């Protein structure tokens, strides 16, 4: 049976959940609103890279959401019921996707009971009272407390960076070959010190450096060590020059929350059609999983060609449901984190799948064109960035001496060595790639996807 507002009100665990749901009870905040009989589901963008998947059962009342809330039902489930109760026409009729079938197959069929009666009101949630006038003294006290906290954090980070400077000098003094041989132990120790100094992002970068070194042949590792340590020095200098610079603060300390990005006046936005060109899912040494979803703007005139959505979650939680499918084209508005070279982004609003398929933007291909110029421009803005996305003209995968794989352009013959992730790409040898998208880190190219005479292929 369909939900009604009294049922939503009764199921809500508390008034604050209803108030939070009221901010999500607009169909525009959701994508993929669909129903089959009395099952209703949709996706709402949260703070991570992937939207939260929510399903509610109006027959044998129940609900499930992929968000981490400890309240049941959460604000997303309440909002979905609310939309169903007030605007059922927002849902299209369709067939259950696998993630809905998985839930219905595992859930118990006992009827969910309403939360204990208390002072809860849909009307009050939909029309909250005007906030009380701000207390100037309380505001001044809160601002002073925040300023002291920020000053303490900056002082701790500065001490940590001073220690990092001494550590880098020690590594170069004792020799980079020795550093590469003992990188896991040495990087882990300085990373732990940086965590204590509240430089969490920089600590993670150094903790992951050994894995990037070990991915290269032994003879190339000192060159990568020089590059990465040099980039770290550039980052620390940028932070010292301006600790409030968004990119430097993010890459040294912690990243902004979603709401902070959306509220930042310098966060550019881009609306249009995007293609999911690849995903990178890696388990880090701190037992967190890094999930990067790469989007490419399909408008040839787009100011920002690429956007990456980053999500992190514990490895013990297992692989999360796949929300963005590589190769899928979506309509969305994304907001970029403030930066001199914006790439990381969050999805503000996601529309329905486009009714037509868009081709990739054309890529320049002539003897005078260097695809790496795209990265040179990006590194000029953020010189400590680890890798940059780029589009590649027509070319093919070839094998060099020693079995190493390269991407080589059809025009001009320029070539880029492929990363170790492509060691099993022998099936691609000689295949014509009409266009390709990849990530360049200064040493290796990691291909994400390519267009071929036989269609699109995923290479990540």
Image: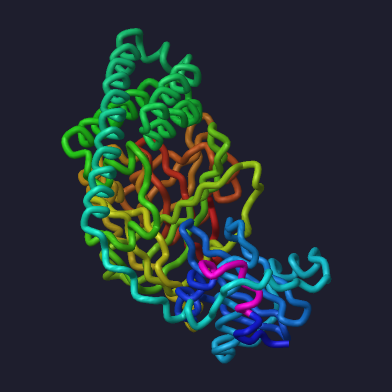
Question: Is residue 392 visible from the viewing direction of this image?
Answer: no
Q: Position of residue 131 (x, y in %)?
A: 34, 70
Q: Position of residue 426 (x, y in %)?
A: 59, 45
Depth check, front residue: 336 or 69: 69
Q: Is residue 460 above or below residue 330?
A: above
Count of picture labels: 0
Residue that extends furthest to the left in the rendered view of this protein: 241
Q: Is residue 186 above or below residue 140?
A: above
Counting from the top left corner in percent of width and height, residue 151 is at 24, 36
Q: Is residue 459 magenta?
A: no
Residue at horizontal 57 percent and vertical 73 percent from the top: 119
Viewport quadrant of the N terminus:
bottom right
Would residue 155 be seen by someone viewing this image from the given angle?
yes
Q: Give the quadrant of residue 440.
A: top left
Q: Which residue occupies the foreground of this view, 130 or 222?
A: 130
Q: Which residues are magenta?
A: 8-17
Q: Is residue 351 left or right of residue 230?
A: right
Does residue 12 belong to the magenta stretch?
yes
Q: Position of residue 204 (x, y in %)?
A: 44, 34
* Residue at position x 28%, y 23% in the image: 159
Residue found at the far top of this picture: 174
Q: How is the image coloured?
A: rainbow
Residue at 45% across, 17% down: 186
> Furthest-bottom residue in view?
89
| Residue 436, placed above or below residue 25 | above
Residue in the image at 57% along x and 91% along y: 89
Res. 64 image quadrant: bottom right
Secondary structure mostly taken by the magenta-highlighted segment of the chain = helix
């Amino acid at each position: 049976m369909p939900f009604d507002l009294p049922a939503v009100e009764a199921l809500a665990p508390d008034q604050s959940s209803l108030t939070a749901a009221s901010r999500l009870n607009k169909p525009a905040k959701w994508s993929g609103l669909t129903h089959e009989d009395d099952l209703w589901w949709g996706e709402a963008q949260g703070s991570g890279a992937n939207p939260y998947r929510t399903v509610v059962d109006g027959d044998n009342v129940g609900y499930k959401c992929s968000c981490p809330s400890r309240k049941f039902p959460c604000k997303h489930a309440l909002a979905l019921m609310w939309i169903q109760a007030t605007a059922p026409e927002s849902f299209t009729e369709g067939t259950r996707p696998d993630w809905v079938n998985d839930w219905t197959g595992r859930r118990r069929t006992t009827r969910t009971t309403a939360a204990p009666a208390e002072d809860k009101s849909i009307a009050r949630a939909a029309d909250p009272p005007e906030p009380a006038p701000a207390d100037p003294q309380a505001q001044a006290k809160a601002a002073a407390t925040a300023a002291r906290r920020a000053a303490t954090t900056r002082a701790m980070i500065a001490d940590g960076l001073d220690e990092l400077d001494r550590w880098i000098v020690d590594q170069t003094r004792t020799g980079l070959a020795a550093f590469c041989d003992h990188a896991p132990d040495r990087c882990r120790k300085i990373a732990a010190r940086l965590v204590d100094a509240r430089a969490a992002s920089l600590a993670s970068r150094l903790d992951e450096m050994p894995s990037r070194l070990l991915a290269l042949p032994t003879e190339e590792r000192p060159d990568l060590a020089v590059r990465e340590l040099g980039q770290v020095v550039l980052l620390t200098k940028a932070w010292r020059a301006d600790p409030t610079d968004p990119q430097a603060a993010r890459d040294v300390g912690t990243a902004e929350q979603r709401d902070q990005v959306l509220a930042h006046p310098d966060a550019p936005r881009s609306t249009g059609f995007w293609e999911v060109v690849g995903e990178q899912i890696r388990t880090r040494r701190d037992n967190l999983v890094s999930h990067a979803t790469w989007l490419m703007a399909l408008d040839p005139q787009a100011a920002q060609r690429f956007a990456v959505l980053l999500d992190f979650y514990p490895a013990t939680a297992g692989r999360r449901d796949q929300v963005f499918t590589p190769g899928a084209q979506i309509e969305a508005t994304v907001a970029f984190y403030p930066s001199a070279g914006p790439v990381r982004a969050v999805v503000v609003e996601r529309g329905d799948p486009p009714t037509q398929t868009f081709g990739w933007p054309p890529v320049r291909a002539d003897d005078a064109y260097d695809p790496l110029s795209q990265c040179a421009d990006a590194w000029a803005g953020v010189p400590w960035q680890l890798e940059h996305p780029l589009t590649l003209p027509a070319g093919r995968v070839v094998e060099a001496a020693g079995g190493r794989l390269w991407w080589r352009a059809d025009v001009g013959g320029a070539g880029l060595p492929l990363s170790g992730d492509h060691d099993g790409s022998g099936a691609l040898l000689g295949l014509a790639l009409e266009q390709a998208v990849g990530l360049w880190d200064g040493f290796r190219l990691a291909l994400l996807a390519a267009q071929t005479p036989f269609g699109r292929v995923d290479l990540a």
